[in-house]
Amino acid sequence: MADRAITVAAWESLFRAQVTIMRALAAEFPSDVISLNEYDVLFNISRAPGRRLRLKDLNRSVLITQPSVSRLVDRLTARGFVTKAPDPADGRGTIVGITEEGFALFRRVAISHMDAINRQFGDALSEDELRTLIELCTRLRADPLRAETPAADAS
């Protein structure tokens, strides 16, 4: 097991980098039609099989609270960007799908947003470093023991 001080320093560094990058990306988010959080919801739905996702699974993928996700999905539904339907496998659940209009908007915004992401990462890290970052982050997310440990939720 790694030294506790190094572990905490690594966590602090990762957390501060994430905050800095998210603030920079939010500051230059390329849409006045949808917010960064709305984009994140559309992104997650668009990557799901059939561009449909259980609301419960969407909640696990975004950084906002469950009530905020529900309100955000309701706003996107009212604007015609997503649909909501009962989950046939769970009568209490909801399936959220992206509409053609929502997907077209997502794609338009994604092109410019990817340019901003590339400036934040591609200008700061080499391709080898980016690959290492992907590998490390994937390992951090995939460790089932950490996901079950209550202390893993501490920030």
Image (cartoon, helix red, strand yellow):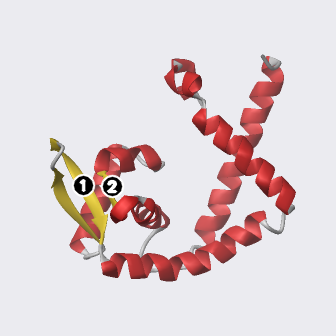
How far apart marks 1 and 2 lie (CA) works out to 6 Å
Residue 15 position in % (x across, y down): 68, 42
Residue drawn where x is 72% and y is 70% of the image: 118
Q: Is residue 12 left or right of residue 38?
A: right
Q: Is residue 53 left or right of residue 109?
A: left
Going by the picture, which residue comes out furthest to the left?
91
Image quadrant holding the N terminus, namely top right
Is the residue marked by circle 1 packed among few (<14), some (14-19), or many (20+) residues within 10 Å?
A: some
Looking at the image, can residue 144 be seen? yes
Residue 54 position in % (x across, y down): 30, 50
Against 98, residue 128 (above or below) is above
- Residues 31 and 46: in front is 46
Residue drawn where x is 76% and y is 63% of the image: 121
Q: Is residue 111 left or right of residue 16?
A: left
- The image quarter in which residue 7 lies: top right
- Disc 2 on helix, strand or loop? strand
Residue 6 position in % (x across, y down): 83, 26
Contact (CB < 8 A) between labels 1 and 2? yes
Image quadrant holding the C terminus, namely top right
Against 146, residue 33 (above or below) is below
- The image quarter in which residue 125 lies: bottom right
- Residues 28 and 140: in front is 140
Is the residue marked by circle 2 packed among few (<14), some (14-19), or many (20+) residues within 10 Å?
A: many
Residue drawn where x is 21% and y is 51% of the image: 94
Q: Dot 1 corresponds to which residue?
A: 95
Under mark 2, the amino acid is: Leu
Q: Is residue 105 left or right of residue 112?
A: left
Residue drawn where x is 42% and y is 66% of the image: 46
Under mark 1, the amino acid is: Ile
- Checking the image for residue 30, the label placed there is none
Q: Dot 2 corresponds to which residue?
A: 53
Q: Earlier in the sequence, mark 1 or mark 2?
A: 2
